[in-house]
Image (tube, helix red, strand yellow):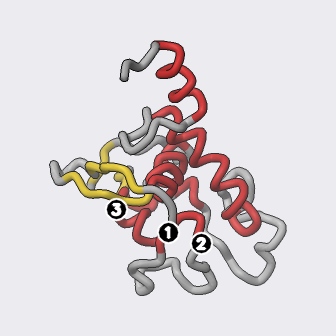
Amino acid sequence: MSVRPVHVLACILLGACGPETPPPESGVVQGRALFLAQCAGCHGASGQGDGPAAAGLQPADLTRIAARRDGVWPVLEVMSILDGYARRTTPRPGMPVVPALTEGPRVPFDSGNGMVREVRANLVAVARYLETLQVPPPGRRVP
């Protein structure tokens, strides 16, 4: 079966490319949509912790993750907080595990350490989106 260029373009634009890792741009678009639907209630649309449900919860300012770590983007730590794996990772109190991030299709993911693992596509997408919110942008990344 051959793949027509139109199908490839539609696949990229719609974010329905199958098991391969989606292009970073589509991951960010998907991550933004997931963030707005699942996280903005507490963290706010801008990610600054000022969502309509934030009263009394003190949600983290997600635009300063890298700044709080001397300009380093800790992708695996962020993904661990998002998926609830490391409940002892600060900030965890009051943050729910979001099934939309912990279920669904898996994609190959290389955090930068050369080890490719299958992880949830939605989890990767939200982490990619959160990286775009960083003020200032991260100077370097660590797995």
What kind of element bears circle 3? helix
**In the depicted view, which residue is nearer to us: 107 or 70?**
107
Residue sitting at 76 percent across and 73 percent down?
54
- Report the residue marked by disc 1: 102
Left or right relative to 82: residue 34:
right
Q: What residue appears at the point 57 percent right and 53 percent down from the top-left corner?
A: 63
Tell me the residue that label 2 is attached to: 98
Mark 2 vs mark 3, foreground winner is: 2
The image shows residue 135 at horizontal and vertical percentages of: 54, 46
Taking depth in this image into account, of 95 and 66 the one nearest to the observer is 95
Indicate which label's residue lies in the foreground, 3 or 1: 1
Would you say 30 lies left or right of 25 here? right
**Label 1: which secondary element:** helix
What residue does disc 3 label? 76
Query: Which residue is at a point 43% across and 59% down the rendered structure image?
Result: 120
Q: In the image, residue 80 lies at what x, y percent?
A: 40, 70
Q: Quadrant of the C terminus?
A: bottom left
Query: Badges 2 and 1: C-beta atoms under 8 Å apart?
Result: yes
